[in-house]
Image (tube, rainbow, N blue to C red):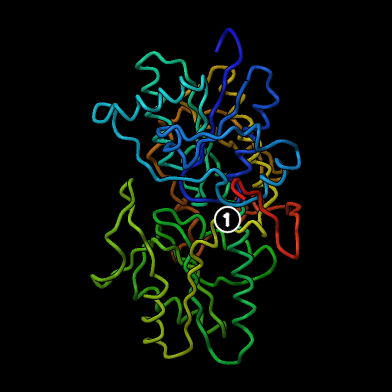
Amino acid sequence: MAGGKINIAIAQSGGPTAAINSSLAGAFKAASDNENVGDIYGAINGIEGIINDELVDLRKILTDDENIELLKVTPSTVLGSCRYKLPAKNREENVYIKIINTFERHNIGAFFYIGGNDSMDTVMKLDDYCKAVGKDIKIVGIPKTIDNDLPVTDHTPGFGSAVKYVATTLQEIIRDSRVYSVQSITIVEIMGREAGWLAASTCVLRANGEPAPHLIYLPESDFTIDKYLDDVAEAMKRYRAVIIAVSEGISPDKLPSSFGSELTDAFGHKYLSGIGKYLEKITADHFGCKVRSIELNVMQRCSSHIASLTDINEAFEIGGEAVAAAMRGESGKMMVFSRISNEPYRVAIRPEPVENCANKEKLFPTEWINSDRNNVTTDALNYFLPLIQGEPEIPYRNGIPVHFRLNQ
């Protein structure tokens, strides 16, 4: 990095969120303001764009502050994404050679990868390879995931906005469910394969006096059909319209062999869906009342019209701090949030060795699950609330939010 300006590259990976583009904007802004940075490239479709040398010149795309501000509040990945698992270097070194060739062809001295657990695996492997072959290229990870399951960091960019969307949608479901006099049960299936952070976060509605969701079930709690039916029966004694939040990854007993999917992604993760519909049938058969299941599906990932300003701003800041870390010589790191206090809410940003984060999961704390294993405690509420504060200013045209698009 000595002896002149370096060029940098930024890529996005994994599932989209409402805040991942804000991290891209933050990294770009910090790099463009740094006199030691030359060209700033964006890689198309994550690490695949580096392997295939498919780069765009971000200085020619993000030409003014207005573009940067619009990018901050645009959902999903403007550069495109991938779920590509970087192979072990002793098995397919040719992939690494292609990556290094792209870096050297464009004089790239630092690479920033915005993503979740699996993306940090790429950061770790690529950093190890660069060091092994003597290439002075700084590799830094910028966290992202609505699952909030990256270890070490207090929370992840994208999570706060997903919480805000899920809670707001659940509140609207509550209003809808209460209009009739008949007994009803509504089951809302929420993303969360192994970690139940997002389903647990629906407890934020308590801050505004909502008793619902009346039951919350997470992968971290023991779930049985018999206990579930008993819980619902008790809730029905108090509420005409019972609302239940369920993580997609709960594993009830007595599951039929046909439930779920045997398909997996490149990292071996099973594709999950259908627990809400499964519980709907069991619940309706048992109670004989009106039962509905709702799967929020992909809408909860990047619904920017109800984004958290705190989330958007923090995503921007951590992107900028990643660039600062690389420019002072850090590599093989993931940027993390450390919570200093809840009231007032304050966090610090620092680099963490990526091997402490890659291929690991942070589960929802079992001490934040109530003794009946069907809801969460006030500690969880206090953790979640600061992450959903504030609303970004979103530009509208013809009554519809305006999004930044790379390809018009």
User: Where residue 164 sits: x, y (%)?
Assistant: 63, 59
Using residue 346 as the reference point, say whether residue 356 is left or right of it.
left
Using residue 35 as the reference point, say whether residue 374 is left or right of it.
left
| Residue 27 placement: quadrant | top right
Observer-nearest of 59 and 69? 59
- The image shows residue 250, relative to residue 364, as above or below, that is below
Observer-nearest of 390 and 204? 390
User: Where residue 350 sits: x, y (%)?
Assistant: 58, 29
x 70%, y 52%: residue: 389
User: Where residue 317 sits: x, y (%)?
Assistant: 66, 36
Observer-nearest of 190 and 56? 56
- The image shows residue 169, relative to residue 235, as above or below, that is above
What is the number of callouts on the image? 1
Residue extending farthest to the front is: 408
x 46%, y 39%: residue: 46
- The image shows residue 385, relative to residue 324, as above or below, that is below
Q: Crowdedness of circle 1 by 10 Å Cα count: few (<14), some, many (20+)?
A: many
User: Where residue 146 sits: x, y (%)?
Assistant: 52, 51
Q: Secondary structure at mark 1?
A: loop
x 75%, y 38%: residue: 65
Question: Which amino acid is tagged 1?
Answer: Cys
Query: Which residue is the site of mark 1?
Result: 302
Using residue 84 as the reference point, say whether residue 294 is left or right of it.
right
Observer-nearest of 183 and 257? 257
Q: Quadrant of the N terminus?
A: top right
